[in-house]
Image (spheres, rainbow, N blue to C red):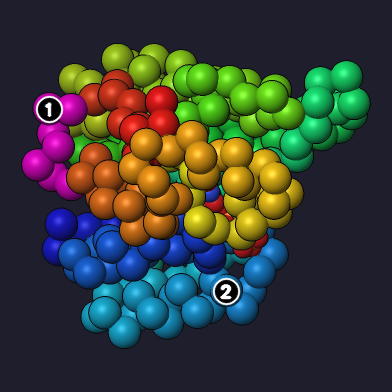
Amino acid sequence: MQGRTAIVTGGSRGIGRAVCLELARRGVNLVIGYAGNCQAAEETRQACAALGVSALTLQGNVAEAETCEALTAAALSDFGRVDILVNNAGITRDNLLMRMGVEDFDAVIRTNLHGSFLMMKAVSRQMMKQRYGRIVNLSSVVGLSGNAGQVNYAASKAGVIGMTKSFAKEVASRGITVNAVAPGFIETDMTAKMTEAAAKAAAASIPAGRMGTPEDVAAAAVFFASSEAAYVTGQVLAVDGGMY
Ligand code: NAP
């Protein structure tokens, strides 16, 4: 993977940061997208640069096409290629359906599903031209199993799976693979927001007996992003300690 270029959305923290570091360890140059946490993004950038790769950060909302085009343009102007896209930026706005506002439903769909669509659209022309690309989308076990209090999030993550499998068929003949990772319950800021009772219940449902780490997820994402995974496309890999 030495010398390849990756765009990682939501690379400032959590799973996205772990993916950036794993890619950097393999010599991949990085464009690190983030929403607003400049300090966290800069920490990730410095940690990647310390591993000997070139890395830059770019702030913006993945739900907006301009951000997705700017991330792609940054990769092209600095590195001349886009080999890998990791669609990792994501949010939750949990509530029971009967109490969920339309704006909370829309915000989650726009960031998690629409954002991943816009990013794939933004990089696809360049990947086609290269006849090489690795797209890794972050779904969730919740997109497979459903989860009370997360109709918006589950819909977005199930949508990501449908989109992954469909786009995989569209671009397979061009040397581009499209796969999804479906994490279970991973220790990040996202899960730190859960109530103690909900976190306890979730932890009790993990056969492996522990929450996952961002590095557990990064290992799967980096496999899909590798040249060796050339004949693997349209797949969903659960990284969930046996939960689903
Ligand atoms: P996290 O710690 O909350 O980090 C979210 C990241 O996404 C941050 O880098 C954030 O940027 C960025 N982001 C959020 N909204 C954005 C937007 N509109 N535009 C651009 N960037 C945006 O999340 P995480 O737990 O690492 O989750 C990463 C991915 O894995 C998400 O897609 C999530 O749904 C999925 N996932 C997580 C778990 C879990 O248990 N944690 C389980 C299954 C799936 P800032 O730092 O600037 O805010």
Q: Which mark is residue 231?
A: 1
Residue 27 on image: x %, y % = 20, 68
Q: Is residue 228 magenta?
A: yes
**Mark 1 residue CB less than 8 A from any atom of ligand 1:** no
Can you name the residue that lies furthest to the left here? 228
Asked whether 190 or 138 is in front, the reply is 190
In percent of the image, x 62 and y 52: which residue is there? 190
**What amino acid type is highlighted by mark number 2?**
Ala
Residue 9: in sight, yes or no? no
Which residue carries the number 2 mark? 40
Q: Secondary structure at mark 2?
A: helix
Label 2 environment density (alpha carbons within 10 Å; few <14, some 14–19, many ≥20): some
**Mark 2 residue CB less than 8 A from any atom of ligand 1:** yes
* Dot placed on the residue nearer the N-terminal end, 1 or 2: 2
Q: Quadrant of the N terminus?
A: bottom left
The answer to whether 27 appears left or right of 85 in the picture is left
Residue 171 on image: x %, y % = 28, 22
The region drawn magenta spans: 226-232
Q: Secondary structure at mark 1?
A: loop
In percent of the image, x 39 and y 15: which residue is there? 166
